[in-house]
Amino acid sequence: MEIPALYSVFKGGEVRAAPVRFDGMKMFFDSEPVKPSYSAEEHNERRPIIIIDVKGLEKKDLDNKLLMKAEFRGSDVWFLTHVYDIDDVFDSFMGNIARLLIPFHTTKNDAVLKDVHDISDNCTPVIFITKGLAVLRKGRSGDFMKLLREIDRIGFRDMAVFDTDGSLMESDWVVIDNSYRNVIRMAGGSAILPDIPDR
């Protein structure tokens, strides 16, 4: 199932979104963000929508206003924002979201992910990819398959790989899909969900 991913900000008293371009890990809007025209009624089945907190990722702090207003009738909201420690996870669930998407590289350490796994089934770690490599903590980069193995060992029901610059080849995705049946593919303005029962 393919679902939309909206690069979003809270502006003028409402949620607004627009496509972005990446320069490394920095995001820049390609145009002035506008009120999204997304409607869940266009689809035959209920599907989630991903809201990417552009300001929160840039400022390294959850945008509470966006979180509180990120609601789309007929869709569960999956919220991707900066998460450093377990307190950020609790803060994120103050909003009406169904799932929190946690960038691996923003977390303090692996212990945070282990704690997240222990307290909630509604969190998904996200590996950002740039130039074909996984973005690690402290500005480093590394092998995305190795990082997938490390996260998988923690026991998360699903994981996400976010190809920010289109640098993963189809052959890379084939290797990922053959190795892990629970990886969400993220790129551009959408995500492809794996077939996991009882999501």
Image (spheres, rainbow, N blue to C red):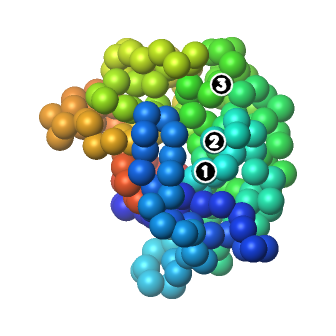
**76, 143: nearer the viewer:** 143
190 with respect to 39 (left or right): left
Residue 109 percent location from the top left of the image:
65, 15
**122, 87: nearer the viewer:** 87
Residue 195, above or below 32: above
Residue 165 percent location from the top left of the image:
33, 42
Disc 2 residue crowd, few under 14, some 14–19, many 20+, Cα 10 Å? many
Q: Secondary structure at mark 1?
A: helix
Name the amino acid, label 3.
Thr
Residue drawn at the location 78% of the way across and 74% of the way down: 13
Residue 78, above or below 100: below
Closer to the N terminus: mark 2 or mark 3?
A: 2
Residue drawn at the location 76% of the way across and 26% of the way down: 85
Q: Which residue is mark 1?
A: 54
- Measured in 3D between alpha carbons, the distance from the residue under mark 1 to the one under mark 3, in whole angstroms, is 17 Å
Q: Secondary structure at mark 2?
A: helix
Q: Which residue is mark 2?
A: 57
Residue drawn at the location 75% of the way across and 31% of the way down: 119
Residue 95 percent location from the top left of the image:
79, 56
Residue drawn at the location 56% of the way across and 25% of the way down: 105
Question: Would residue 134 be visible to someone looking at this image?
Answer: yes
Name the amino acid, label 1.
Val
Residue 97 percent location from the top left of the image:
71, 57
Q: Secondary structure at mark 3?
A: loop
Name the amino acid, label 2.
Leu
Q: Which mark is residue 107?
A: 3
**160, 156: nearer the viewer:** 160
Labelled pair 1, 2 in contact (Cβ < 8 Å):
yes
Closer to the N terminus: mark 1 or mark 3?
A: 1
- Measured in 3D between alpha carbons, the distance from the residue under mark 1 to the one under mark 2, in whole angstroms, is 5 Å
